[in-house]
Amino acid sequence: MSAVWSFIQYQVLGMRWLDDLIGGLLTTLNVDIGTRLGGSAQFFLYDLIKIVILLVTLIFIISYIQTYYPPERTKQILSKIDGIKGNTVGALLGTVTPFCSCSSIPIFIGFTKAGLPLGVTFSFLISSPLVDFAALTILMSIFGVEVAVLYVIVGVIIAVIGGLIIEHMHMEDQIADFARPDYLPAGGACPAGNCACSKPAAGLKQWNELTPRNRADEAWMQVKTTLRKVFPYAVLGVFIGALIHNWIPTDIIQAVLGENNPLSVPIASLIGVPVYADIFGTMPIAEALYGKGIEIGTILAFMMSVTITSIPSLVMLRTVVKRKLLAIFVGICILGVILTGYLFNFIF
């Protein structure tokens, strides 16, 4: 059984065969992959091609699933559940929704506009970019099954607890007027970007009337849209990963993020905050850091902070919530990321 899992992790998900293939092709072209420049070229080509393959495959699968859970259906499900069950369902539904927090915020607006409990909507908002099938698959390819499964469990717990904290603080007054259920703009027009008011595109069938071919077409459209959006950041992430892997000395990285530095987890968390990327963009950096001997929890802290507390997503969220609620949301996320990092460093 262990041999099967090893094959899945290294050859199916990790695509080590692709690394060997690219190394062989570069060697055939008289490129010495043992040098820094040659090794960087191999790392760059291997990781970029692997990420594109994973992007296309995972986005198609997840987007196909999402055709069964549009915002309208998600609102119907969440409106019938309250309390900790509602937070849990909100967090779990976040695992089958968009890849980055910027994509989740319009859906978040729709939920608040529909009058769903604030804690449930924040459980969804935390979980959506943090815990999904893409994250599970990528973490399995880098760290193995145990790390990936535990990461998903911890991510859902963070989303549930974060939502419960916000729910018990009764901060409904911190939501912008246009995102409240009773808001009606002058003239009856809907505010820009409010997905709760948007109508389905002409000619599109309702979600429950879509055929498998319709769903596949919708999924493929999402693949092309997301790939255009994510690809530049994936290239940048691979480039940074190649630099870390082949050019930055291990002792420098260890001094900043190594296990001998007790502040490595908070430092990694803060480094990730201003980075705008998704799980795919952080993947090559995570692989490079892992190759330099950085602990799993420290790497996860960086990846998590990138996905849920990036500056662009916080700027978008600021248009929906007031400063006090935004500060609490960021505080909960960063605290959860740091605790998760230390937990994984302790376990693994």
Image: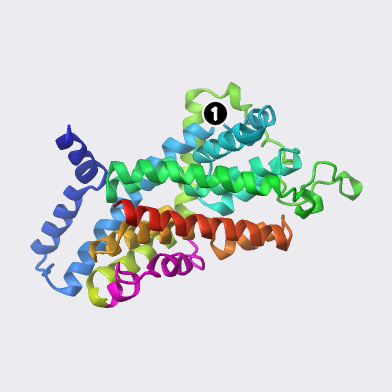
Determine if residue 195 is in view. no
Q: Which residue in the protein does label 1 denote?
A: 68
Q: Which residues are magenta?
A: 252-278
Quadrant containing the N terminus is top left
- Locate residue 196 relative to residue 125 in the image: left or right: right
Give yes or no for residue 126 being in the magenta stretch.
no
In the image, taking residue 197 as reference, residue 49 lies left or right, namely left
Q: Nearer the viewer, residue 97 or 166?
A: 166
Secondary structure at badge 1 equals: loop
Q: Quadrant of residue 36?
A: bottom left
* Picture coordinates of residue 173, whole percent (x, y): 80, 52
Q: Nearer the viewer, residue 5 or 161?
A: 161
Q: What kind of residue is marked 1?
A: Tyr
Question: Does residue 148 appear left or right of residue 209 in this picture?
Answer: left
Q: Does residue 298 appear anywhere in the picture?
A: yes
The residue at the point 88 percent across, 44 percent down is 188
List x then y, in percent, for residue 226. 48, 49
